[in-house]
Image (cartoon, rainbow, N blue to C red):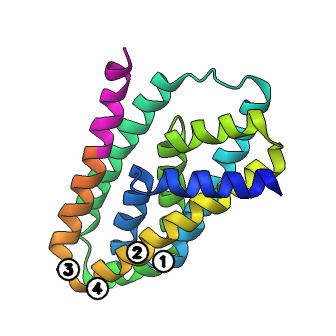
Amino acid sequence: MEAFWISLAVIFVAELGDKSQLMAMTFATRFRPLPVLAGITIATTVVHLFSVALGGLIGDNLPTTAISIAAGIAFLGFAAWTLRGDSLSDEEAEKAKRATKSVLLAVTVAFFLSELGDKTMLATITLATQYGWVGTWIGSTVGMVAADALAILVGGLLGKHLPEKWIKYGAAAAFAVFGVLLLLEPLWAS
């Protein structure tokens, strides 16, 4: 239980203001909350399981450069997809809103890539080197999903009050900025 509570608190705080929390808010302005939260939960569960396994085995040896580049390219793709996606007819747009599987897949992939090598992943690895892996895994996953659920709530409220054009360009810009930052991250680490 100690690993659970410590991991939950540390990861919840680490996630506040993190890029993935901002991403959750962005997705929530465009899609229904449940598929967004489900995608975040799936990605977080897998990444944090990997993190605790890695923390238990090697602790601090991650190939973050290749991960950052792949994630950056994916985010630029999500930016283009966001801009392209709004050219649908009204009927197609309504179908897209109901297409939970494609939203779930997009959110899951985006979060999975953004969390690889992220500070919450590194924090989870570190916690796993000091505490039991099961408690760390469950606690870190719950902490991150809780923090991102807050972002989804805020994003959903903003989405109801902002014009769709602003949301489209804002979401595309956010994904593009995240993509560029992820591509530049290996250069800053050098």
Find disc 2 in the rendering and name its residue.
Answer: 31
Dot 3, how many residues are within 10 Å of its Cα: few (below 14), some (14-19), or many (20+)? few
Closer to the observer: label 3 or label 2?
A: 3
Residue 160 drawn above or below residue 60? below
Callouts 1 and 4 close, C-beta under 8 Å? no
Q: Position of residue 66 (x, y in %)?
A: 48, 24
Q: 57 and 91: which one is in front? A: 57
Sequence-wise first label, 1 or 4: 1
Residue at (32%, 44%) from the top-left corner?
178
Q: 26 and 70: which one is in front? A: 26
Q: CA distance from mark 2 to mark 4?
A: 11 Å
What amino acid is at disc 3?
Leu
Q: 168 and 56: which one is in front? A: 56
In terms of image quadrants, where is residue 27?
bottom left
Write down the region rendered in magenta: 178-190
Q: Position of residue 99 (x, y in %)?
A: 49, 75
Find disc 3 in the rendering and name its residue.
Answer: 162
Q: Position of residue 134 (x, y in %)?
A: 83, 49
Q: CA distance from mark 1 to mark 3?
A: 17 Å
